Amino acid sequence: MLSDGRRQVVDFYLAGETFGFEVSRTHSFFAEAMVATSTRTHCLADNTGTQPELLGLALHGMLRAQEHILVIGRQTAMERVAGFLLDMSDRQGGLKHFDLPMSRLDIADYLGLTIETVSRVFAKLRASGLIKLRSIRCVEIIEKTALRGLCA
């Protein structure tokens, strides 16, 4: 939550993904589960050193954050939503159809758009035959190459 009451969604995490690296005892962010979830915590004592796999996970998280900043700062609404759908597909093994556990409002807050804009872009992508909405939360990518072309 921002100081003025607006909400900023930083990322969506899928099964097996790692998040929540903190450098102090004060937490900067919080997580909200959208589906049945379990978590594990890892705490490194000051004298244990950094485990190589944790460093790799942290660096991967930083790369995703940098990419997200570029999306928010420089892409159109169409590019943002198309990229989001491709990312969700890729992160789930390149599935042609997949469920989105988050609402359109969550997607809007993540992409820095309004819910109306996200809904309009979904409708345009559907009308152009690039995606099919099997249900409110199930998306099928029909033309992956064309969808990727929108992100270029």
Image (cartoon, rainbow, N blue to C red):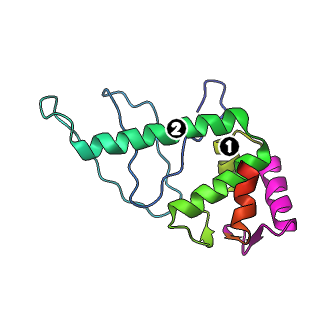
The numbered disc on residue 21 is none
Q: Residues within 10 Å of mark 1 (few under 14, many from 20)?
A: many
In this view, the residue in front, 19 or 31, is 19
Q: Which residue is mark 1?
A: 111
| Start-end of magenta stretch | 115-138
On whether residue 127 falls in the magenta region, the answer is yes
In this view, the residue in front, 144 or 123, is 144
x 76%, y 53%: residue: 150
The numbered disc on residue 65 is 2
Q: Amino acid at mark 1?
A: Leu
> In the rendered image, which quarter contains the N terminus?
top right
Q: Residues within 10 Å of mark 2 (few under 14, many from 20)?
A: some
Residue 152, horizontal then vertical, whole percent:
71, 47
Most extreme residue toward the top is 3
x 38%, y 39%: residue: 59
Residue 11, horizontal then vertical, whole percent:
54, 45
On whether residue 78 falls in the magenta region, the answer is no
Q: Earlier in the sequence, mark 1 or mark 2?
A: 2
Disc 1 versus disc 2: distance between alpha carbons? 12 Å
What kind of element bears circle 2?
Answer: helix
